[in-house]
Amino acid sequence: MDKKITHKEPVNVLVVGVGGQGVIMVSKVLATICQEHGYQVKQSEVHGMAKRGGGVFSHVRFGEQVYSPTIPKGSVDVLLALEWAEALRWVNHIRPGEGTFISDTQHIVPPFACRNRKRGAEAGYARETSDQIISRVNKGFALDATTMARELGNERAANTVLLGLLSTTLEFSEDVWCDAISRFVPPKTVDVNLQAFEQGRAWAAMDHGTPEPVVHNDGPTPVVVGREEHEMSDFVQLDINPAWCKSCDICVKMCPERCLKLDDQLKAVLTDPDRCTGCRICEWLCPDLAITVHRTPEAARAAAQG
Amino acid sequence: MGRNATTAAKKIANVETKPLMGNEALARGAWEAGVRVAAAYPGTPSTEILESVSTFPKEDIVAQWSTNEKVALDVAMGASFEGVRSLSVMKHVGLNVASDALMSMTYIGVNGGLVIIVCDDPGIHSSQNEQDTRLFARFAMVPVLEPSDAEEALSYMSAAYDLSEKFDTPVIVRSTTRLSHTRSPVTLGERTEVARRDFDDNPQKNVMIPSHARIRHSTLIEREKNIAEYLETNELTRWEKADTSVGVITSSISYGYVKEVLPNASVLKLGGSYPLPEKKIRDFADSVDRVIIVEELEPAIENQLKIWNIKAQGKEFFSRMGELSPELVRDGFIKAGALPAEAGIADVFEIEPVPRPPVLCAGCPHTSSYMVLRQVEARVAGDIGCYTLAAVEPLRAIDTCVSMGSSIANAVGMAKSGVEEKPIVATIGDSTFLHAGIPPLIDAVYNEANITVMLLDNHTVAMTGGQDHAGTGKTLRGDETHRLNFEDVCRAVGVKWVQTVDSYDLGAMYKTLREAIDFKGVSVLISDRPCVLDPVKIKGPALAVIADNCTACQSCMNVGCPSISWSDEWFDGRHKVKIDTSTCVGCALCPQVCPSDAIQPLNRS
């Protein structure tokens, strides 16, 4: 079926993902198998900040003799990614025209990507589709391993689905993989992980069109509303009536953009108009109805004319 | 020590080999070398070494977390005085803390062998600088050994103890992040029990007063010469004869990169960068057409060769900053003309990577501390720990961060400057406070500084993965011990205003912080909640967003919680939010800032 890798040179597998996904477990399974087959193995990872939501990567190299613990760019034989944006971060490290790309299409959107307070702003997350990637690598698999694992009863077995795919690109037998997986996953989850592994292998053997990346939500796909408002202008004008303001400080404390303040007279004022997004929280929360937010020039003019 | 493919394969076939992380190999090496006492303060990338030492039997080896690196080194020194082999472990910046002891200890020498493992962090993966310990070794005139992989990490430990006892000197074994955290096969040996030496009743050697120290200084210079001579023929110095058009001098993990990139070059692999075997280096340089030195960070070897007037090149091809890699070493050799220039591999894809910086965890108890600090618009002197992550948006509530324990004294100085109009607050974690925060707190009280100290007590050394300390009531081996009470310590040094608040109660945090700031003098507010990751992973019932209530105001996004992100729904041109129930720990900070009551327990939403 697939051509196995049998280089004399070290074989380089780069495992990437997000902290907590099991990158280290995956690379340990692989490293152990290689070690037990008489190869010299080096497995290199960086701890520390990774645990706190950052990207995680682990280099696994095996061969007769391995010197560098890290894989030079452009020498990755197999990229195994547990998350879509992490796959894209490392895709250029694959050996051009030769390497294999394996990725879960799961999106883990970092909070950093949801910072833009402008109206109509989208999350700053990868736009590339799996088709765009798969069509331009030597061999590529992009699959929704997380959903496959969830349907088996344990979302955390997604990385084992991907191990199933990886196993089809390397020389070690199926039994060897199953044995190693059984030793590394929590005892209660051995069965589900072995099933996940089989599904990964089966998926690799099937002929697919490549799926679109899927965004996982906690509930059913919600109806998209409000998108037409993207075209709305960024116009914002805040009218604060000082006569009605009684210095309670609620608007100042609750402003998400921290752009309100009490002035010398202890009256609320807008200190940083550029930061104000017109979210209306101050208008809604003001117990004295002292704040009005205008979102169009017309509304502001009308209010001014009384 | 020659390691070609056949010997490597043979090793795997005949002897017990095991894949070990560099740090595990160093620990194993210490145990095999017969070490009796090991003390350390945790610090990335060195932390796993003592954790790994503590997996060996109590009867063989004492393993303890000490209050800071200086204490750890002094503990090891004490054991050495008593004639047993001892070990102290720290990260590079820890050696700064321990340096006062080290600079005297180098004069005293050792009785039982003493090794200090120092882990550098080239590339600054998790540190505040990337200082090069090899320069420190030169400064202290302490020999330094630099293993290049896990196998050497283990074997160099025994070599280090032999060196220590043979030449009456402490020895530094220097690792780096890459070596410490790379797993590779290691040949396991057995423990060698080393006979205890009698206490050396010799004040001229053990008591450093001026008249003794003057004499010891000359011993030190003699020692430097003797060790260099020993390294001329010792197997720690390895000459790999091959193609003579280029000769490479290297040490540490750089050796691996050189072998990867320029496998045919002659290599002089040094066991360490100080002291250097001059004659061997001269012979090597004479045997090749040109010498190129490959070393990470500072030109420690190169400068010495320049002093000796041995023609060599190095830093003109390789950076003084950051971590080396096969790519950078290849580039350097190309620049040097030792490799033919090759067309760089063009990127197949033009992709802008999604930034994924580290963030405080979902439910991190530090979050609320910095939310209220931002609210009161304080001038905040920060310290070393996970909470440095609060220096960036959306919390952005730390103004300075220098070194372990700096926050409190920095705050004292800010107050004494007489120019700061904002309330001045020092924030410091529980373990950092014990490490170096108590003397400055005494200073603050003694000098009547008007500051507030926010002691972030999350009951663990969180940044390094959850180690115990004097405030947790548990030892490194997990045994119960006295649990230090932070309020008692603060009151004992004379702080008149001390209060403990639940970090998850935002209102109480805000109100109490205002009171603490209003207090004239030193006030200590202890923000108290266990870390959600360590020692046990905390997972309470998750919260969820009632989408109909959400006005997309983004208030909860200001918490900076990684469990909160945008949903596909919109309100008034902005994304509503959603909570990932699998990672939400139910700390309930976000509902406390939600103005529309849209965040509720999962089962009610």
Image (cartoon, coloured by chain):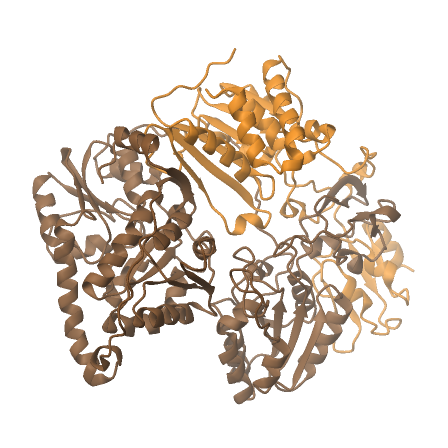
Chain colours: A orange, B brown
Q: Position of residue B501 (x, y in %)?
A: 71, 72
From this viewpoint, is residue A257 visible? yes
Q: Position of residue B185 (x, y in %)?
A: 37, 38
* Residue placed most toward the observer, A176 or B3: A176
* Residue placed most toward the observer, B310 or A117: B310
From this viewpoint, is residue A105 visible? no
On screen, residue B273 versus residue A57, left or right, reads: left
On screen, residue B298 versus residue B518, left or right, reads: left
The residue shown at (40%, 19%) is A6
Question: Which quarter of the figure has residue B510?
Answer: bottom right
Question: Which quarter of the figure has residue A230?
Answer: top right
Q: Examine the rendered structure and indicate whether residue A219 appears above or below residue B508.
A: above
Figure label count: 0
Q: Position of residue B236 (x, y in %)?
A: 21, 48
The residue shown at (60%, 36%) is A185
The residue shown at (38%, 56%) is B119
Q: Quadrant of the C terminus of chain A?
A: bottom right
